Amino acid sequence: DSGVTQTPKHLITATGQRVTLRCSPRSGDLSVYWYQQSLDQGLQFLIQYYNGEERAKGNILERFSAQQFPDLHSELNLSSLELGDSALYFCASSPGQRTDTQYFGPGTRLTVL
Amino acid sequence: QQQVKQSPQSLIVQKGGISIINCAYENTAFDYFPWYQQFPGKGPALLIAIRPDVSEKKEGRFTISFNKSAKQFSLHIMDSQPGDSATYFCAASSLTNTGNQFYFGTGTSLTVIP
């Protein structure tokens, strides 16, 4: 158990809808990272937050947004969902903003029908 | 464009054998190279990592070999065990002034046959 929690575990929704994925980092970790894992794209870095502020941005679509709250939990919002958004979404946390080791959560499996 | 290229896609090894997974990168700004192990239904977990100032790092049965001039690094699993059967991802990261951006390889599915 990495200490990172993600909810929900599974999410099934329809195209065009909007969903919110939630992540609670390990106790004491200030950085949160979001990743998308799909069969054809592998593990793709989406975005990093550190202590409430955006720090690094990867291949995140404009339909997706994230934020980190004062209690350090983070939410990833996915809107106007498409079939291709079906994937596993992982959150990871680390102590600092430039820290090597990331601890991954168990993921949220999103299915868009 | 894939920043980190990983091969092979899948690997089958006999118990006790050596598993070797290779990765290559282009961006010389990368300064941290971790390997992650992922079991079905779980998130990736850090296995071992290396920085470009050393050519090899060993932790138990796991060794990273790093060739800076060739921009390649590899994971060697000695005395492979059935419990090592998992998907392995290499990654590369550059530490900027503000944060980390990680790039992952496409993964190698390792099966160790008893």
Image (cartoon, coloured by chain):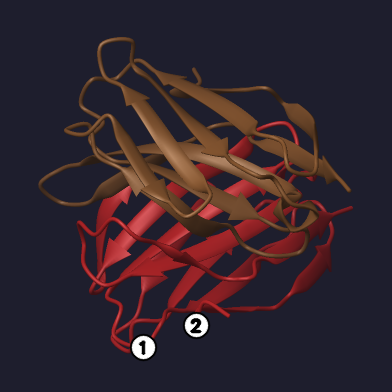
Question: Is residue A23 in sight in this rendering?
Answer: yes
- Residue A28: x and y in percent read 29, 85
What amino acid type should be assigned to the residue bearing mark 2? Gly
* Chain letter matching colour brown: B
Chain of the residue under label 1: A
Q: Residue furthest top?
A: B70
2 or 1: tag closer to the N-terminus: 2
The colour of chain A is red
Q: Residue at x 26, y 31 (%)?
A: B30
Q: Residue at x 50, y 46 (%)?
A: B62
Q: Residue at x 39, y 46 (%)?
A: B58
- Residue B13: x and y in percent read 79, 34
Tag 2 residue:
A3
Tag 1 residue:
A27
Q: What element does badge 2 sit on?
A: loop
Q: Is residue A111 left or right of residue B56?
A: right
> Looking at this view, is A4 or B6 the one in front?
B6
> Looking at this view, is A8 or A103 the one in front?
A103
